[in-house]
Image (tube, rainbow, N blue to C red):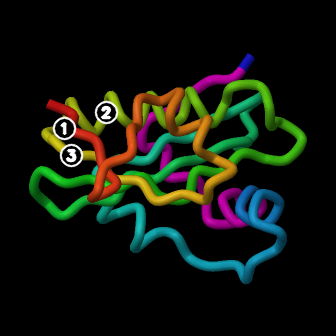
Amino acid sequence: MIELRIDPFPPTAELNTLWSAAWVAPAPRDFTPILSRSLTHIGAYHDNQLVGFVNVAWDGGIHAFILDTSVHPDMRRQGIATRLVREATRVARERGAEWLHVDFESHLTGLYRACGFRPTKAGLIKLV
């Protein structure tokens, strides 16, 4: 069973392990300064292990940005990314965001359409 946690602030090593698996071994980094400025971030856990993650950055006002949607390769195709993005959308709206932006590669169009995103000239959706 997958459990979603809002603002879990996972340890750097745990997030780097997921990041490395999901993004084909990028260099480790410290996510603490990034997450401390985020509107929210959502972690997906299976047996208390981080298997998915999404970050919502923001401008401090009404615009928020979906970033770094990640699911461990062994856990893909189970709806985890969809659940993460939908929960991130809900929390962003609850915390005052009115616009939610996302940039993505074309092969992810189905995921983001399933989460309610629609193409616009600006590449964003209105949350309010």
For this rendering, which residue is in front, 45 or 52?
Answer: 52
Q: Amino acid at mark 2?
A: Val
Q: Which residue is denoted by mark 1 in the rendering?
A: 95
Q: Which residue is denoted by mark 3 in the rendering?
A: 99
Q: Nearer the viewer, mark 2 or mark 3?
A: 3
CA gap, disc 2 and disc 3: 12 Å
Q: Count how many numbered circles sit on residues in the image.
A: 3
Q: Is residue 120 above or below residue 104?
A: above
Is residue 112 part of the magenta span, yes or no? no
Is residue 7 part of the magenta span, yes or no? yes
Q: Amino acid at mark 1?
A: Arg
Q: Amino acid at mark 3?
A: Trp
Looking at the rendered image, the quarter that the C terminus falls into is top left
The first of marks 2 and 3 along the sequence is 2
Q: Residue furthest left?
A: 61
Residue at 71% from the left image edge and 62% from the top image edge: 19
Q: Which residue is denoted by mark 2 in the rendering?
A: 91
